[in-house]
Image (tube, rainbow, N blue to C red):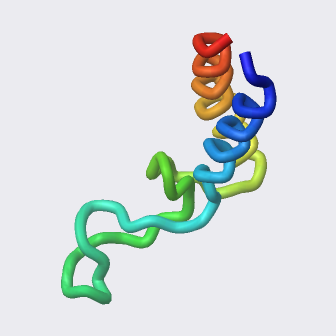
Amino acid sequence: MDKAKILHEAQAELQRHVCGTYIDKGVSVALGGNGNVVPGCEACHKRINTNSQYLRHLAEDVLPGILESAFEQG
């Protein structure tokens, strides 16, 4: 079990889950579609409106997957 490798992979996975915006339901209106710009996790396409919802998403949705992956490697 290489702790540095596990840490690096965990950090990379956490950094993928950015609280920003994504296009929901197709192409954006700017490109001629009828999609909506939605605030939330860009990696999961989960709607998030507040910082506390974002932290809860990381703790409940992202972290368990990271820990499961780390335990499988160890």
The part of the image, by quadrant, that contains residue 50 is bottom right
Residue 44: image location, x then y, percent: 47, 46
Q: In this view, does 1 lie to the left or right of 34?
A: right
Image point 75% across, 43% down: which residue?
Answer: 55
Q: Is residue 35 left or right of residue 7?
A: left
* Residue 68 sits above or below residue 8 on the image: above
Residue 17: image location, x then y, percent: 60, 50
Residue 10: image location, x then y, percent: 69, 36
Which quadrant is home to the C terminus? top right
Image point 77% across, 46% down: which residue?
Answer: 52
Frontmost residue, 43 versus 73: 73
Residue 53: image location, x then y, percent: 69, 45
Image point 20% across, 86% down: which residue?
Answer: 32
Q: In this view, does 53 lie to the left or right of 43?
A: right
Which quadrant is home to the N terminus? top right
* Residue 72 sits above or below residue 20 on the image: above
The part of the image, by quadrant, that contains residue 14 is top right
The part of the image, by quadrant, that contains residue 58 is top right
Image point 67% across, 52% down: which residue?
Answer: 15
Q: Which residue lies furthest to the left in this view?
A: 32
